[in-house]
Amino acid sequence: TLDFGKTVYQVVQFGEATLNFRGGTPREGKPTTYFVSSRGAKAVVQIYDPAAGVFRPLPPRVETPIPEGAILRVGDRSYVFRSPEWVRAETEARNRILAERDLLINQRAAVQLLPDGAAEKASKVERLAKLEQDFVDLMAKEGRDREGLHGLQAELTHLALSDTDFAVAARQALAGELSPEAYRSAQKEIGKKLVAEHQKPLADVSAFLIGLTKHNILTHRFAKLSDENGAAAPNPHARLKDPADIAPKLVRRGWTDLGPLTDVGGARVVVKTTNDVLPIVEAIEAKYKVRPQVTRDGAFELDIIGEEKSAGGAVVSEVTLRPDKDHPDRLTVGSSSGYRAMHVVVEVDGKPIEIQIQTEAIYQWGKIQHSLIYKNKNLPVETVTELNEFCRDVAKYLTDLESGPAGATRPALPLLAKNLTAEARAGLNAELRKMEALMDRYERVAEDPGEHKTQIFKRPSGTQESAVPPGEKTDAAIPSAKVEANGEGNGHLPQRRALAEELAKPAGLPKAKPAPKAAPVKGGDAVAVQAPKPPPLPSAKGYQQVLDRADKLGRELVSVVEVSDATLSGEAKHWESSFANSLNPDSAHVTIRGGWRHLSKAEFEAARQAGTLRDTPASSYEVRILGEERRAQVEARLQKQYGSRLEKLDAPYPSESRWMLRNEKGEAQVEIVLRAKPLAVPTVAEAREAYTAFAKDRLPVLAKWLEESSTPRSFYAFRMSQMLGVEGDGRGGYRFGGRFVAALRRFETATDPVAKARAGEELAVMLAYLRDARLLMPE
């Protein structure tokens, strides 16, 4: 940029295009006029014409006036023009918000340090609450968030560069041709059109789901819901998205087209337990075409494992592709907030309809969580964080209770900040009592299933039992040819048995036999017992049966692999456990990290037709391990555990080994892939340089977090300080020390080769954490 008094010249390189920007001399009372010109001889740059709603070529070597918020397109990239005056004003406004926020944070910290009995504390708490509310009102008035960012401007910029129907109105608003009110109105009209297009497809899906509630096999899987007044609540429940929320959601998710937006029309199904989810999903899949799910940014999930040279010398990037984000694991693992549900997106007349399936426990949890979190966004940040973590832990606890009370740990109530107003504290305590009552209820269910019991009518020896609701007639009392043909009496969907029969024919497998006709119940004698899992399919190679057997073996396999982590030596083991326990394992540099991939129905069918089903694993388990030595330890443990059942396979790369785990019959069950990530031992100079770089740009942040008492960040900082050797000197300062320096000294002075190797490995692990800490600690 060249500044000649009142005229500014700037040259910007956009790929193949070079643009000149010039700010002319402003006239009295009028803003500065800016011009843009292209240096090249070809018109490779386009500028958006808001009046015509189209992009027009920018004449080469000709100065063209460029207004505030104008959009330039160069190749497949688009840019928004912002003048220096706009940038200066926006920066000042944002800094003002940040200064107000920091002042409030400091005042809150000062109030927290006052003793509980101090006379002035109550009045200061009240005054602070009013100041915080004034700050919230100021942000709302200016349309900014807690970081000082202007929400509407960010939305306009994002949508103006998108390939959606919302782009035209956003471009006009950027050019100043639409007021904020007119822009919102235009976006809402576009949203109404999208909603109307999904109305009929949603009605189709809603009618189908309501029909499932009347299905004689599926009806008892649906939960009976009630609202806050005790009146019956609809289940399933369908809804169309608010037209005004469609454009903001595209911005929140960072989407530039409508492809990932699948919930304009949506339905919710609430079932009793996670065991009831998959039968509902199978019925949906039998009726509709199901779309693969996408990630939050609209792309399929992709994990890059690494790059290696193949035998031919070519560099190959090895990746794992996970196109289905909403895997059944989401029912038990959940999202970062604790939310657990399975989303199935079906297509009706080309329009996506999203079906959300969740358990009754998580449905009740979600209502309380909404009251705790989303209705209290104006609470202090640390309080919201505490509530979020508590809700997440409760969701996990409720899910764990489905496996019985033995393995579940009940979360403790969060400690509320002392500077809350009496009204806010009373409201939060009321919702927390509801969450406690919810946990109490499902603890009783786990110990004695109660309302989740069904009546199992006694049958003569040799016949199957059928789960039926209390008060209804059994299949035996009313013999039905349809029941016998479909085999519904054993608790399976007709589609499951049809699949087993279809798959059995070409392979010469025995055909699934119909359920035996049951004798009439004599005397109506019944006992209340917990409904057992459906018996396995009679087919010797039914798809679901194959997955179930592999799943049981897979759980055992994971426990064997994880136990091998205990073979880590000395301090390295301490670092591993500390880091894994205090940070998010998905973001951390953990020692052992695994992932599952299950055989699809299409792959099952292809293997059956090819006659290779016996050697086709139902599941694959991939484990990434730090260091060749640890991989060898895992291999040794697996061989000791499984012996001849573990068969070594050819591996394409020297850094990995592949194994096939078979059952007692010799059938392939699980393929195990062990990938070793190199654990490079640094030199002393490299270790000192890396640690110094961390201390320079992250140690001040860590020190500040350590001073914030009673917050999750201070606990995080405490754990980090333990691992990275940052110790307080008792006078408010922080110095290097502790384990890192000790490990560095051992590595530098060790003469025994074994001791030096152990210290070097420990140092390498800690340096890996240092690299991750630079990413995990935002400035």
Image: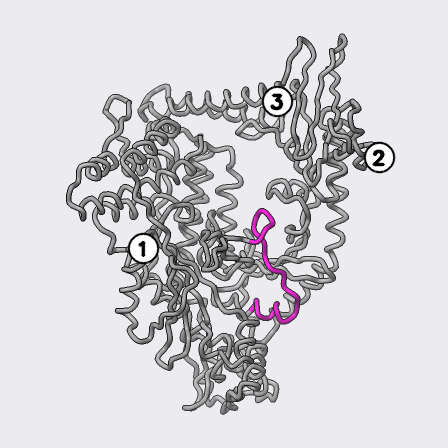
First of labels 2, 1 by sequence position: 2
The residue under label 3 is 90
Q: Quadrant of the N terminus?
A: top right
Looking at the rendered structure, the number of numbered marks drawn on it comes to 3
Q: Position of residue 208 (x, y in %)?
A: 66, 67
SS class, disc 3: helix
The residue drawn where x is 34% and y is 67% is: 556
Marks 2 and 1, Cα distance to the nearest angstrom? 63 Å
Mark 1 vs mark 3, foreground winner is: 1
Among the two numbered marks 2 and 3 on one chain, the one whose residue lies closer to the N terminus: 2
Instruction: Name the kind of residue labelled 1 in the image.
Output: Glu
Q: Nearer the viewer, mark 2 or mark 3?
A: 2
Label 1 and label 3: CA atoms lie apart by 53 Å
The tag on residue 52 is: 2
Q: Position of residue 273 (x, y in %)?
A: 47, 64
Whether label 2 touches label 3, CB < 8 Å: no
Q: Tell me, yes or no, whether the two marked residues, 1 and 3, touch with CB atoms within 8 Å.
A: no
- Where is residue 95 shown, x and y percent of the image? 54, 21
Magenta-colored stretch includes residue 286 = yes
Judged left or right of residue 419, residue 609 is right
Query: Quick one: 129 or 704, which is closer to the camera?
Result: 704
Which residue is painted at 65% across and 19% down in the image?
84
Alpha carbon of mark 2 to alpha carbon of mark 3: how far? 29 Å
**Residue 693 appearing in the image:** yes
The kind of secondary structure element at disc 2 is loop
Q: Quadrant of residue 31?
A: top right
Magenta-drawn stretch contains 33: no
User: Magenta segment, which residues?
Assistant: 280-300
Residue 628 got which mark? Answer: 1
Residue 442 visible in image: no
State the residue at coordinates (25%, 46%): 572
